[in-house]
Image: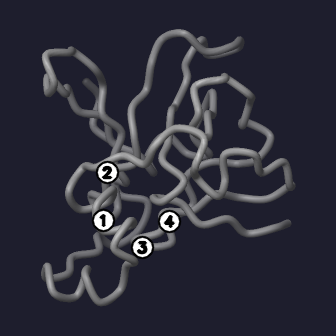
Amino acid sequence: MTQGSETSAKVERTDAEWRALLTPEQYNVLRQKGTERPYTGALTQNHETGEYMCAGCGAVLFASDAKFESGCGWPSFYIPKDSKAIAEHEDVSFGMRRVEVTCARCGGHLGHVFPDGPKPTGLRYCINSASLTFEHK
């Protein structure tokens, strides 16, 4: 797996600070590696032009022009805005072998990346809406 590098200073907070900053759903996803139910996330059907940032630290992760409709129930992207903004880790939980995607800046769990996306990368970054915020451009 490749490890993302810093896009800016690392963000470190105590558990109490994370709990105070995030909603319960954001905390579950970002800090406890949870997932939202498919088709329930606020950004799943977002088609606006802008940037998707980490809900934990504000790092820019994905651009709207890399978002596509995968039919999986979560926002899907074929490439991050900057490869250094994310980190990838092997995930063997739940009896599966997957690649977990985290924010390189704060370590928050974002989702997983799969090798079944569209050209030009062939990748599908399947990301929880709860781990993202969106800024219109």
> Within the image, what quadrant is residue 27 found in?
bottom left
Query: Within 10 angstroms of label 1, few (less than 14), some, or many (20 or more) residues?
Result: many
- Which residue lies at the image location 43% right of the left edge and 26% below the top edge? 113
Earlier sequence position, callout 2 versus callout 3:
3
In front: mark 2 or mark 3? Answer: 2
- Which residue lies at the image location 22% right of the left edge and 88% below the top edge? 17
104 or 123: nearer the viewer: 123
The type of residue carrying mark 1 is Cys
The colour scheme applied to this rendered structure is one colour
The type of residue carrying mark 4 is Ala
Dot 1 lies on which element? loop
Q: Please, is residue 43 above or below residue 78 in the view?
A: below
Residues at discs 4 and 1 in contact (Cβ within 8 Å): yes
Query: Within 10 angstroms of label 4, few (less than 14), some, or many (20 or more) residues?
Result: many
The type of residue carrying mark 2 is His
> Within the image, what quadrant is residue 98 found in?
top left
The type of residue carrying mark 3 is Cys
Which x, y percent locates residue 119? 71, 11
Which x, y percent locates residue 108? 31, 58
Q: Which residue is mark 4?
A: 59
Cα–Cα gap, marks 2 and 3: 12 Å
Q: Which residue is mark 3?
A: 57
Q: Please, is residue 77 above or below residue 35 in the view?
A: above
